[in-house]
Amino acid sequence: MTKKITISVILIASIAAVLIFTVKPEKPTGVNSEVAEALTVIAQDLEIPWDFAFLPTGEILLTERPGRVLLITDNNQQEIQVTDTIVTQHGESGLLGITLHPDFSNNQFVYLYHTQETEDGLRNRVVRYTFTGTALTRPLEIIGKIPGARYHDGGRIEFGPDRYLYITTGDATTEDLAQDRSSLAGKVLRLRDDGSIPADNPFGTAIYSYGHRNSQGLAWDAYGRLWSTEHGRSGLSSGLDEINLIHSGENYGWPQIQGDKARRGMVKPATHSGPDITWAPASAAYYDASLFFGGLRGEALYEAVLEGETVVEVREHFKGQLGRIRTIRIGPDGYLYLTTSNRDGRGNPAPGDDKLIRIDPGIL
């Protein structure tokens, strides 16, 4: 299915640089009363929400995988127009990551990661736009020709403390591409904000690290260390999902090693789910010395407790109560925000799904 992102929107200005718009005091169904009191539904009836970003004025820009960008403001969900962009959505591909430029307040730059059908098949790309308040305009391709497929498209984009853009790509269901440094598949990429290559990238290309199956989470801890979450093997032998500590130029082993296996020149994960447990980790956010990530198949909010470069414990929150959880972000108000992904064909949608939910971290 191919959809052109269309839409018009009225940007409702806010007077604070924190999330201040009033939200309807709705509580998720299917959770116990104590948990429900700590959760607030910000938006619902979403269609496979994938990522979201907080505007300086407090509103939220949110991507839906079929090819829409929504502005979430004061209980309203309105599509915005995205200029000259065609999104192809098959399986896990489509409109995925979104992030704002570090100087967004001055330049209004918004970055999107999405899939397109091309003469060479499915390809992923990152495009920079200018947000006018009513549309995303002036598209500039930052990087393209990233191998795409029905599954394993990566899609997370984040600016790091160094103000460079980091991008996760999947192996596009061709495992050996993850080890091929001539391919952009199965990598963490690192670029300047205009798409040019930083002089200190390890291979003189966009590639920062390689040997990844399908990373969908990136987050920096309080010491500037980069962590990622990564989907492990699937099918009947699912499990071995990973948390990785990412270093420039390192090979993270897929498909040659997984779990506790070791091979010279390859980096084992900081921790993994084991062979009998599947998290299907779909995001990453650092908060109070822990790495939080959504679990799709695991249907939980996971918390990896960090001590330096070591994961000492992985905790589960809301297990089985909210369904499939994808993106976790820390809001400007200090609360955690998450999206459910129960309408993606693999979940059991509840009334109002999918949802954007705010969490009081005090309950965790």
Image: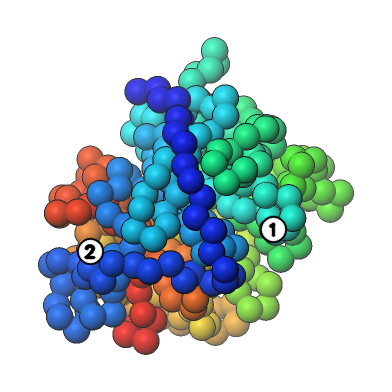
Secondary element at tag 1: helix
Q: Quadrant of the C terminus?
A: bottom left
User: Is 228 left or right of 32, judged from the image as shown?
Assistant: right
- Decide which of tag 2 and tag 1 comes sooner along the chain: 1
Check residue 25 in the rendering and tell me which mark sits there, or answer none: none
What residue does disc 1 label?
A: 105
Residue type at tag 2: Leu
The answer to which quarter of the image holds residue 22 is bottom left
The answer to which quarter of the image holds residue 83 is top right
Residue drawn at point x = 43 percent, y = 67 percent = 21
Residue found at the far top of this picture: 119
What residue does disc 2 label?
A: 322
* x then y, percent, for residue 29: 15, 66
Mark nearest the camera among 2 and 1 is: 1
Is any part of residue 251 visible from this angle? no
* In front of the other: 216 or 163: 163
Residue type at tag 1: Ser
Residue drawn at point x = 21 percent, y = 70 percent = 27
Residue drawn at point x = 30 percent, y = 43 percent = 47
The answer to which quarter of the image holds residue 145 is top right
* x then y, percent, for residue 168: 56, 48
Residue drawn at point x = 36 percent, y = 49 percent = 77
Figure check: 214 above or below 240 = above
Q: Quadrant of the N terminus?
A: top left
Mark 2 and mark 1 in contact? Answer it, CB < 8 Å: no
Secondary element at tag 2: loop
